[in-house]
Amino acid sequence: MYKGGPPGSGKTLSLTSVLQSMQNITLASLNFSSGTTPEIILKTFSQYCSYYRRGKSIVLEPMESFGTNNWLVVFCDEINLPSKDIYGTQRVIMFMRQLVEQGGFWREEDNVWVKINRIQFVGACNPPSDAGREKMSPRFLRHAPILLVDFPSQESMRQIYGTFNGGIFKLFPNLKGEKDAMTEAMVELYTENQSRFTTEMQPQYFYSPRELSRWVRGIYEAVNEMESLTKEECKSSLILSDCMHHVLLTTPSK
């Protein structure tokens, strides 16, 4: 399976969360870079798998210590970062394609064909239009279901960050009714900044829900040690100071 979408849309988090919650799954997470080669796949196999002789065949499968029916899922994050060679090929991607298509590989030290069993690959990446990304070969992608993970809608963000803010305001029962107003102000400011400052103006003007997550964490850290907080203090200091701090950090200098 292959998940694509803009940075900060939750591709890695959602995928790893699901895989870690599944039974009979061992997750091996790899972070690809421009210099990633097939050796990283072989090293992962050596850490999580063992060779077994089955009749005349050599089979590579997850170690018995993980369970008799356990699967190894190799998660390749930023899978479209590896650079192409002089032939226009991403070697590590073509090696993974061979493993999927042919079901094995030639072991270098003794030239023996090794079959793979109960090994699965999944990946996630940003769009190929982003800097440093490569367009992946259709010969590889034809083997994988492709999912698009986009940013959540404004209504979804209100629900997500309203839940976070609700947890924060539980520290101050007298401010329970301010949660919705706080959430609405945060989402509105985020949306306006996102539409005002674009990557066409500057490459670093990229907004994702990560900005709201950082903001929520900052608010929690600011109020966690407070013994009390009035509604007036919340409106005048908490919201305004954090809003202005966020605006100052994201407003381009002239």
Image (cartoon, grey):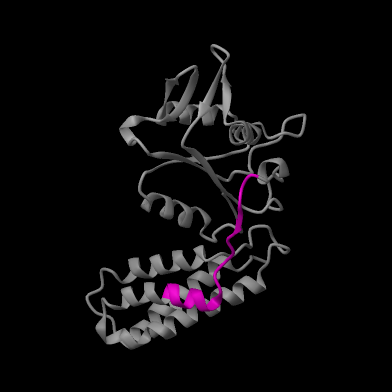
Residue lying at the far top of the rendered structure: 110
Residue lying at the far front of the rendered structure: 55
Q: Residue at x 36, y 82 (%)?
A: 234
Q: Is residue 151 magenta?
A: yes
Quarter of the image that includes the C terminus: bottom right
Relative placement, left or right, of 215 versus 83 is left
Q: Is residue 115 magenta?
A: no
Q: Is residue 205 above or below residue 72?
A: below
Relative placement, left or right, of 100 versus 167 is right
On the image, the x and y values in percent for residue 24 come to 36, 44
Q: Which segment did they paint magenta?
A: 143-161
Viewer-proximal residue, 39 or 218? Answer: 39
On the image, the x and y values in percent for residue 193 come to 60, 73
Residue 224, quarter of the rendered image = bottom left
Relative placement, left or right, of 170 versus 31 is left
Q: Residue at x 42, y 29 (%)?
A: 49
On the image, the x and y values in percent for residue 132 come to 68, 45
Q: Is residue 101 above or below residue 195?
A: above
Q: Residue at x 42, y 79 (%)?
A: 239
Residue lying at the far left of the rendered structure: 227
Q: Residue at x 48, y 20 (%)?
A: 58
Viewer-proximal residue, 103 or 82? Answer: 103
Count of numbered circles in the view = 0
Q: Is residue 208 above or below residue 88?
A: below
On the image, the x and y values in percent for residue 221 come to 34, 66
